[in-house]
Image (cartoon, rainbow, N blue to C red):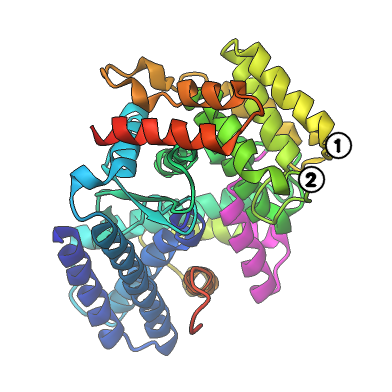
Amino acid sequence: MLSKHSMKGMDVLNTSTDLLYSLEQVKAGRPVDGEELAVRLGLGQDLLTRLLDAASSQTSKTARHDLFMLTIAEQVEKKLALRPSELQLRLRQAVKDLQNQQPTPATVQILETVTDVVAGITLRSVEGLSTSLL
Amino acid sequence: MNSSNELLTYLRTKLGQADATSSKQLRKQILAFVDSSARYLIIQIQYMRNVMIGTPSPDMNPVGRLVEFYGETMGLEAPVYAYLGESYYSTGAFIYYKKYGQRLGTEYFIVSADLADPAVFWVLSAHEIAHCWLSRKDLVDQICNDNPLITDKTNADQVESHVEEALCDVIATRFAGPAYPRAFASKLWVHLTEEYANRHPLYSFRLECMAQALDDSRFYDEAGSIREMMDEYKMRPWKDEVISWSLDRLLDLTTKMPPVTSAKTGRSCYDFNQYWDMICEASPASDPAIMKRASDSLLSQLEG
């Protein structure tokens, strides 16, 4: 099936770029639709919670994990040179930040790294659909 | 067409974000999203062109009628369009957005059946319809995500892919009955002793899944024939498959799949078992002349 493996990153990439964009606009003092921001913060919180679950499964055999999220978690750890337990701490804090609508630079850094990892996966998966040109 | 327009409107919004952001990194990431979305759309347009070019009118598309019926009976939430291509595959559900956090619905699925095959093999489309059905469910995740035996994360994609393929085989067998494994084995018999490809489980595991699904439906003789064939071909033991641990779950999660015979249609031609009974009972079995006769009979009924 063509779509299943190749589109897994689309949700994550859309959510994280939307949220990063909104946070940037807020920081720059530009007007942002309140409802839109609330939805984006909520989706971002869901995303980081799923990533936290996946990261937790690296240190706990009973934790539920999504294999795609686990792949992202491992790559984020590598990029930020974090141990699994350190990533869990950072993610836990990031989820709280988004809940309180007060993202810190550390939270933004996590979001940026996740976005970077997923952008790479998504682009590669589209390329994988075709053997021509790319 | 409406969805394409909604998608393009959404992508324009994202391009507006890319223009407005002061972060070069974010701009690149937003453009990655736009690029991927646009390319998926182009891929879908190409498939839709294949459907339109390959099927001048619905009356002249018997494979289209068949997969439409399969989709309806399996309970797909969007129509399925089919054409004869170079192999059996399906597009599944593509994901698009119309607003922040709001996905567009799945408007259709596309399935290709092998142009070179006699019509009796089109029962293999049931496997592709199962992919479409699964693309809106979380059965694969249910099997993979909670399994403590999956410790090698580098194989995560392979495990998921194997589980999905095996699940589709079980669903197709529950749905189509012995006709599915018979068509499967007849089409792939040359390959059955090969080691598995990266994205598919061992053939012996796939056949064991089908045999167990047949056992569940009391097709004991047909299940026995599959196992005899596996012995005869000296296939690698199915327990060597990396997802052999999933067999019980694959079967448990699909017990409610309706068989094709449960559909309230007066058209018995959709049940391929009658044709495969004819082919398997012939002497010699799978005689090309019998296969042609069965396919001609099937085609005339599908077109009728």
Residue B203, image x, y percentages: 71, 41
Count of marks, rendered view: 2
**Left or right side of B100 for B296:** right
Mark 1 or 2, nearer chain start: 2
Mark number, residue B193? 2
Query: In percent of the image, x 48 and y 61: which residue is there?
Result: A6
- Identify which residue, B77 or B16, lies in the foreground: B77
Is B121 drawn above or below residue B195 in the view shown?
above
**Left or right side of B175 for A68:** right
State whether residue B169 appears in this view.
yes
Is B52 drawn above or below residue A128 in the view shown?
above
Mark number, residue B234? 1
Q: Secondary structure at mark 1?
A: loop
Is B290 drawn above or below residue B200 in the view shown?
above
Query: Of the residues shown, which amino acid type is indicated by label 2?
Result: Thr
Magenta stretch contains residue B292: no
Query: In percent of the image, x 61 and y 49: which residue is there?
Result: B161
Magenta stretch contains residue A83: yes
- Identify which residue, A129 or A106, lies in the foreground: A129
Residue B118, image x, y percentages: 47, 43
Query: In percent of the image, x 34 and y 72: which residue is there?
Result: A23
**Left or right side of A61 for A69:** left
Q: Secondary structure at mark 2?
A: loop
Q: Tell me the magenta residue range.
A: A63-88
Q: Quadrant of residue B134?
A: top left
- Identify which residue, B222 or A123, lies in the foreground: B222
Q: Chain of mark 1?
A: B
Q: Chain of mark 2?
A: B
